Image (tube, rainbow, N blue to C red):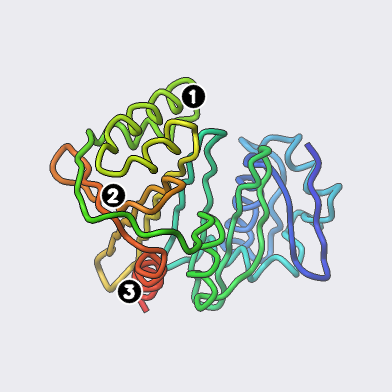
Amino acid sequence: MSVTFDPETGHLRLDVEAFRVLVEHAERTAQQPTRPPTGGGSTPGDAVARLVAGGVLVDGRPHPRLRETLTGVTASWGSVQVVVGDDEGVRLHHAWLGATAVAVLTDRGDSTFDLGPSHATQLPGTLAAWVSLAAAPELASATVTVPDVLLEELASHRPDLRRAAGRALADALGPWPVAQDRVRAGRWRLATVDVALATGDQTLAQHVAWLDTGAGLLRAEAVERDVRLTPTTSADLQRDLATVVAAGG
């Protein structure tokens, strides 16, 4: 799989293995600034070769255009993980908050990822784009409870398990018949956002999860071994995303 790099913008497209190797090289460079890392040891040679061919590694070091972004990964004080699952598949996005830069890794859904710089003030919008959060009808006030394993299965990489969970979810949405019909037809999306922020000697962890039923949004909140689903709005979720990202600032 090829690596595509634009040194003018710093935009980089690569696969998981190439990303892992690139981060290893960035960490070694930071630890041994006078001794460029090599592709030996446990580093897969194929990934190194692809990074070199793409102009990403130069003399064993990340291209200067990438160094600030990679510092956001290797010296971060916070991280964000976003899982998006729907009838068609699952995507896993990441962001790291560094002292001088934010790095975002966007899952393109084809086994490649876009790595690029960002800013903390742009993160709520980035998260909203990752989960396709947009205005939606507001569902009638009601509450349903589903087993917590159902959400895990909605985010499974196994299509059969994920789609079976979608059917089980539809069965649980009796208070919202239109949403029930759309979920049964495969029009659903699960989004989970997990934020970990270093605050002094502690790590503050926050979690936001919801379901887009195609007819409205349902917030998902853990209650012991179950998950409680209640109607919410895109405005409320956007505010929550901004709050959890800013919590460590």
Name the quadrant of the N terminus.
Answer: top right
Among numbered discs 2 and 3, the one appearing first in the sequence? 2
Residue 2 in the image: above or below residue 99: above
Q: How many residues crowd around disc 2 within 10 Å: few (fewer than 14), some, or many (20 or more)? A: many
Badge 1 is on which residue? 158
Work out how far the residue at label 2 is from the one at label 3, CA to CA, in angstroms: 21 Å
Where residue 79 sits: x, y (%)? Answer: 43, 60
- Looking at the image, residue 35 sits to the left or right of residue 206; the answer is right
Q: How many residues crowd around disc 3 within 10 Å: few (fewer than 14), some, or many (20 or more)? A: some
Among numbered discs 1 and 3, the one appearing first in the sequence? 1
> Amino acid type of disc 3?
Ala
Badge 2 is on which residue? 220
> Amino acid type of disc 1?
Arg
Work out how far the residue at label 1 is from the one at label 3, CA to CA, in angstroms: 34 Å
Q: Nearer the viewer, residue 62 or 118?
A: 118
Image point (61%, 35%), residue name: 42
Work out how far the residue at label 2 is from the one at label 1, CA to CA, in angstroms: 22 Å
Badge 3 is on which residue? 247
Please tell me whether mark 2 sits on a helix, a strand or a loop: strand
> Amino acid type of disc 2?
Ala
